[in-house]
Amino acid sequence: CDSPVSLECKVCEIIKLGSHDMFIADITGVSVNPEYLDENGRLMLENAGLVAFAHGDYFELGKKLGSFGYSVRKKKKSHKK
C-alpha cells in the first residue's frame, strides 16, 4: 500500500529524549499520489484512510471539521432592518 504523501528529508539534528529520539529535518522533496488530488491539485486527505496514534490507541481520521482558526473565529454580525 503506497502512502498518499511522502516527504523526503535530510536530518539536521537528532535530539536524545531518554525513551526515544527526536529528529529535526529539512524537507527536500514531496511526492503525492495523484489519486488523492482534486481537479485543482488540492490534497483530499479525507479520502486517504489515515490513522492517528494517541494515548496507546489507533484512531481512524475522518471528515473535515473546520479550517485553521475555525474554533476562535468571530461570528459575522447579521444586519437586521
Image (cartoon, helix red, strand yellow):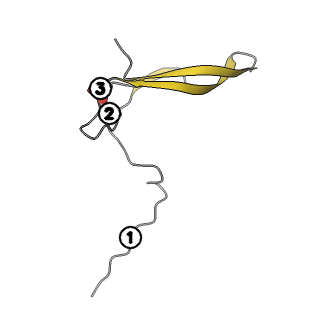
Q: Is residue 1 visible?
A: yes
Q: Which mark is residue 34?
A: 3
Q: Nearer the viewer, residue 13 or 72?
A: 13
Q: What label sits on residue 76 in the rendered view?
A: 1
Real-space CA distance between mark 3 and mark 2, rounded to the nearest whole angstrom? 14 Å
Task: For marks 3 and 2, give the one nearer the viewer.
Answer: 3
Task: Give the residue furthest to the top.
Answer: 1
**Neighbours of disc 2 within 10 Å: few (<14), some (14-19), many (20+):** few
Relative to 69, is 26 above or below? above
Give the SS element for disc 3. helix
Picture quarter with the C terminus: bottom left
The image quadrant of residue 13 is top right
State which tag comes first along the sequence, 3 or 1: 3
Residue 62 spot, x, y in % from top left: 34, 33
Mark 3 vs mark 1, CA separation in Å = 37 Å
Quarter of the rendering occupied by the N terminus? top left
Q: Which residue is mark 2?
A: 46
Question: Which quarter of the figure has residue 55?
Answer: top right
Amino acid type for the residue under numbered disc 1: Lys
First of labels 3, 2 by sequence position: 3
Q: CA distance from mark 2 to mark 1?
A: 28 Å
Q: Residue at x 57, y 21 (%)?
A: 9
